[in-house]
Amino acid sequence: MMRTAACSMLALVLALSGAACSKSTTTSATSTTVTPSTELFSGTLSPKGSTFYSFTVANTGYPVSITLASTATSKIGPATGARLRLGFGTPSGFGCGVTSSVDTAAGLSAQLTNANTPADSSGSIYCVQVSDPGQLASDVLFVIRIVHT
């Protein structure tokens, strides 16, 4: 009887130790850090004129922020309060097919943000357009900052 109890106890210990040694795997989620890119687009805008700049977004699904950072009448001198029209869209022919726009003066914060950049037929190529909404009396120098991923 003692021998049977010892065998039973040994069987129980072996069963429990086998369960303790079972292989268990856990996976943890990995996160990808996306670093934003900053591009500058600058030039001279004439009254009633417009120009655009194309750029490629590497990681779709993230916002694009556009800031009219500076306007001036000369390279050396004070900034102007000129209001320009900023547009965001996709290249179309020899221009920019604007899907959203805003008339704004230069500032420190983004004046135009596209919340989500889906992949498009152009392969994630977008454009920013700057134009005179009809207020310029002379040429103006501009700098636009584009932040995207």
Image (cartoon, rainbow, N blue to C red):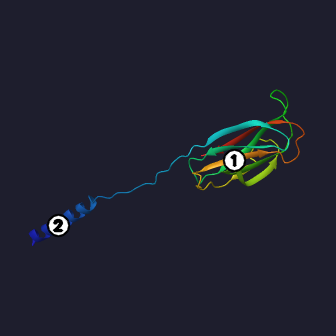
Residue 58 in the image, given as x and y percentages of width and height: 56, 47
Q: Residue furthest front?
A: 93
Between 108 and 97, the residue placed more toward the observer is 97
Residue 142 lies left or right of residue 91; in this view the side is: right
Q: Residue at x 58, y 52 (%)?
A: 60
Residue 135 in the image, given as x and y percentages of width and height: 89, 45
Q: Residues within 10 Å of mark 1 (few under 14, many from 20)?
A: few
Between 128 and 46, the residue placed more toward the observer is 46
Q: Residue furthest right?
A: 137
Which numbered mark, 2 or 1, is in the foreground of this view?
A: 1
Q: Secondary structure at mark 2?
A: helix
Residue 122 lies left or right of residue 65; in this view the side is: left
Name the mark on residue 103.
none
Q: Secondary structure at mark 1?
A: loop
Residue at the disc numbered 1: 94
Residue 63 in the image, given as x and y percentages of width and height: 64, 51
Residue at the disc numbered 2: 11
Vertical placement of residue 76 versus 60, above or below = above
What whole-number distance in Å separates the C-alpha atoms at marks 2 and 1?
A: 82 Å
